[in-house]
Image (tube, rainbow, N blue to C red):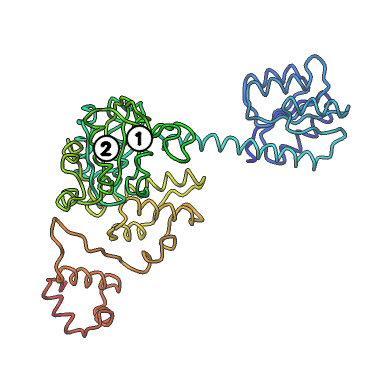
Amino acid sequence: MNSAKLLIVDDEKIALRSLENAMKKEGYEVAATISGVNALKLLESQEFDVVLTDLRMEKVDGLQVLAKSRELYPDSEVIMITAYASLPSAIDTMKKGAFYYLEKPFKLDEVRKVVREAVEKVMLKKENAQLREQIESFKGRVKIISQDMKMQKLLETAKQIAPTDCNVIVSGESGTGKELFARYIHAHSKRGNDPFFAINCGAFAEGLLPSELFGYEKGAFTGAANMKKGLMEMADRGTLFLDEITEMEPAMQVKLLRVIQEKEVLRLGATEPVKVDVRFIAATNRDIKDSIKEGRFREDLFFRLNVVSFHVPPLSARRDDIPLLSYYFLKKYSTLMKKDVTEVTPDVLGILMNYDFPGNVRELENIIERGVALAHGNTVEVTHLPEDLRELSIKTFRKKEGKIPSLEDQEMSYIQWVLKEVGGNRTIAAQTLGIDRVSLWRKLKKYGLEE
């Protein structure tokens, strides 16, 4: 803050030098002049954070300096100083945008305090402007962070089919980023500049989804005081993302099928349909074919939606992305929280790399957000992780390469983890496992882990 630039303007040399010396001692970069004319020239050549100017000066007065500063640098602040204090002149200068009004003879402590407050305000405005620019870099941008080869191929295919306008089904576990994937397709399509709407089909009580999707006419039901467009109509020429599509009620599935076939929407209570041009991207974390077999999802609707399908892999299947995503979220939340957190310790990355992330990318994002919030310095430490991650190496029983791991696979993995945790000490490892050293030795030999 002390690196702020100040311009001091006063046609009384003694007052000018007093202010100049006092502000330099505070650590500010100071330019001083006894001429209002020269002050205008200085303002045209460089920006000052705070201007202290006398009100009454020949040729160019303080109000003209104030006006020029506000014109050129709206975020700068101007403090007015005068020996001819009066209520009308004070009100006038404040109305014209002055930060504060000081009377002569002034007290230097008061000047220091007012200047400090003005500088703080200017710096805060600058920080907020910078923050808005950085946040804008995250908003509206569809960014899928991955260096995994399979994921890269998936994104390349998505980019290829994006302009074709065909409907798409995206499958994958919760938290893998299915909506982000849908936004990626939308952004690379011809509809990229038109609306994208998302709705969770499982988030509505029975009977409420139709009014959200189709809209309704005034008086269509009790409480319908005005006409309301549905999301399908609002998404005209754009994309509608239907998350958890398998949770949609059977009656609603029939209506959705008709919209896809006829390309028109009938609001609740209306007699005439409205033409719509919408691309549908549906998503599910279930096996949609099982839902069809069980009679919970219409096969004809599936075929209408499933022109192209994508399966977004879980984070545990692309572990190389964990450090990359960690640093991406680190930068994102450091910016949003206005903190200078730039590093994740190797120990933290080691824990994250060995964690199976049942909550996928969303869980990793939450962990890093928590770490940034708790960090006091510029580094996320192990102590900033959730307690269960700090104390346990949590393993979920995921399928590996399509196979459910055997009990022996799990036992071998657990023994390896325990040995790693105790620094290879077999006596402590055996005690931890609840077996004797001989039994541990046999298991190590069995699994080829003697070394």
Q: Position of residue 410 (x, y in %)?
A: 19, 69
Q: In this view, does 376 lie to the left or right of 216?
A: right
Q: Nearer the viewer, residue 258 or 236?
A: 258
Whole-number angstrom distance, CA of label 2 to CA of label 1: 9 Å
Q: Which of 245 and 104 is in front in this view?
A: 245
Q: Mark 2 points at which residue?
A: 255
Q: Position of residue 319 (x, y in %)?
A: 25, 52
Judge the density around disc 1: few (<14), some (14-19), many (≥20) Cα neighbours within 10 Å.
many
* Above or below, 149 relative to 157: below
Q: SS of the residue at dot 1?
A: helix
Give the residue drawn at x 48%, y 40%.
Answer: 223
Q: SS of the residue at dot 2?
A: helix
For residue 94, the mark is none
Which amino acid is tagged 2?
Answer: Lys
Give the residue drawn at x 12%, y 76%.
Answer: 445
Instruction: Determine the image quadrant of residue 211.
Output: top left
Q: Where is residue 444 in the image (x, y as percent from the top left)?
A: 15, 75
Which amino acid is tagged 1?
Answer: Phe
The outermost residue toward the top is 59
Q: In this view, does 144 lie to the left or right of 8?
A: left
Give the residue drawn at x 38%, y 39%.
Answer: 212
Q: Which of 120 and 373 is in front in this view?
A: 373
Q: Mark 1 points at which residue?
A: 214
Judge the density around disc 2: few (<14), some (14-19), many (≥20) Cα neighbours within 10 Å.
some
Are the residues flagged by discs 2 and 1 in contact, CB closer than 8 Å? yes
